[in-house]
Image: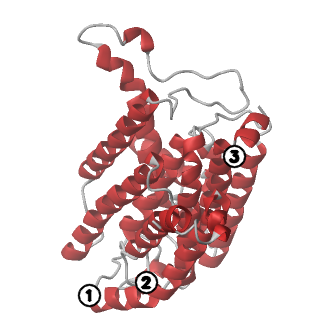
Amino acid sequence: MLLYLFYHVLLRYFHALNVFRYITVRTALASITALLITLVLGPWVIRRLREMQIGQFIREEGPKSHQSKAGTPTMGGVLIVSSTVVPTLLWGDLENEYVWLAVFTMLVFGIVGFIDDYAKVSKKRNLGLTSKRKFAMQILASTGVAVALLTLTATGKYSTQLSVPFFKNFHPDLVIHSMLTAPYIWWMSYLPFLIFIALVIVGSSNAVNLTDGLDGLAIGCVVVAAGALTVLTYVTSHAGFSAYLDLPHIPQVGELTVFCGALTGSALGFLWYNAHPAEVFMGDVGSLALGGSIGMIAVAIKQEILLFFVGGVFVIEAVSVILQVASFRLTGKRIFRMSPLHHHFELAGWSESKIIVRFWIAALVFALFSLTTLKLR
């Protein structure tokens, strides 16, 4: 929006506005805009949530120290979504398909989270949508993203080949081209791609959701992951950097750098109010939207596998839940005192602040490692 105004309308009068054609400049401005929107609107949003009595309900089987958090305003994720989408639309190139795909992903997953949060608030207990309904809605949204990416493949703006870290000559195609001409079953050639994209985006969305259990824990890790994705997105779109680092070169994803910048800024702003002791919780509307967006960015820049390192803390938290459930169903015994993993450390005697900071450090280490792998190919 502002890009069009400054670069296409006013440039003829003010040549200095040419600076707005640079993605780095607009990324910085989007990040600052998102941060300011969150900081300025934060107190008003928290006050409105409190007036509407939209408070968090704490499950009784959780750590007893969490009972004091009951009633804290939740659904603060609407602030994160708004402060990410608005700067993206202001500073991004609205003619770029990836910008709209990122906005679509954040809004749709945010809506799923909003429905889940609203169900919890209306029932006045920590139970929202059933797992089956939530997964069905997430899979449907992810499939929509995958179909959109397939249309971009037809125009040469995307590739269905997988980028595998450490194996620069190994690029398996997720579309079975030999089946495309087969009558009646040609559609099955796209199934591996659709399934893989759904697994990445839905898995990322739920992993962030599971991590959101302590004040500032999830949003702090999101800041780190979004910062790393900002770098990865920029180098993927840059011809020189992508060639030097042997990365898939996708020029059109450059505008996603603006989205990543806005995401980082909004997450930092929300952390201001979500830091321990939290004044507001993001709720599922925030965690699902953030996780879905992170997954979509990784898919767009062909770093789906590297996402396991970029979001290492999210992966560990999700795996801890999977292992806990599998162990209990198979053996009747639990591996951890409680899952997700951060609750295990709480019950082990670690203070909440210590767990949060140590997980942030782990997130930073994972993100730095993911960036170092760029040259190890």
Can residue 11 be seen?
yes
- Number of the label disc, if any, that sits on residue 77: none
Q: Residues within 10 Å of mark 2 (few under 14, many from 20)?
A: some
**308 to 30, vertically: above or below:** above
Q: Nearer the viewer, mark 3 or mark 1?
A: 3
- Three-letter residue code for mark 3: Val
For label 3, the crowd category at 10 Å Cα-Cα, with few meaning under 14, some 14 to 19 and many 20 or more, is: many
Nearer-the-camera pick, 62 or 39: 39
For mark 1, what is the residue? Answer: 52
Badges 2 and 3: C-beta atoms under 8 Å apart? no
* Residue of label 3: 235
- Outermost residue on the front side: it is 13
Residue nearer the viewer, 72 or 107 = 107
Amino acid at circle 2: Lys
**Vertical relation: 343 (above or below) 37:** above
CA–CA distance between discs 2 and 3?
42 Å
Q: Is residue 127 visible?
A: no
Provide residue 76's location: percent of width, then percent of height: 40, 76
Nearer to me, 252 or 273: 252
Q: What residue lies at 60% left-to-right and 75% top-to-bottom?
A: 32
Q: What secondary structure is found at the residue carrying circle 1? A: loop
Question: Quarter-wise, where is residue 116 in the image?
Answer: bottom left
**Comes first in the chain, label 3 or label 1:** 1
Point 27% across, 45% down: residue = 136
Which percent across, then down, holds residue 288?
40, 59
Q: Distance of mark 3 from mark 1, alpha carbons?
A: 44 Å
Q: Amino acid at mark 1?
A: Met
Q: Which residue is mark 2?
A: 69
Q: Earlier in the sequence, mark 2 or mark 3?
A: 2
| Residue at 52% in and 42% down | 300
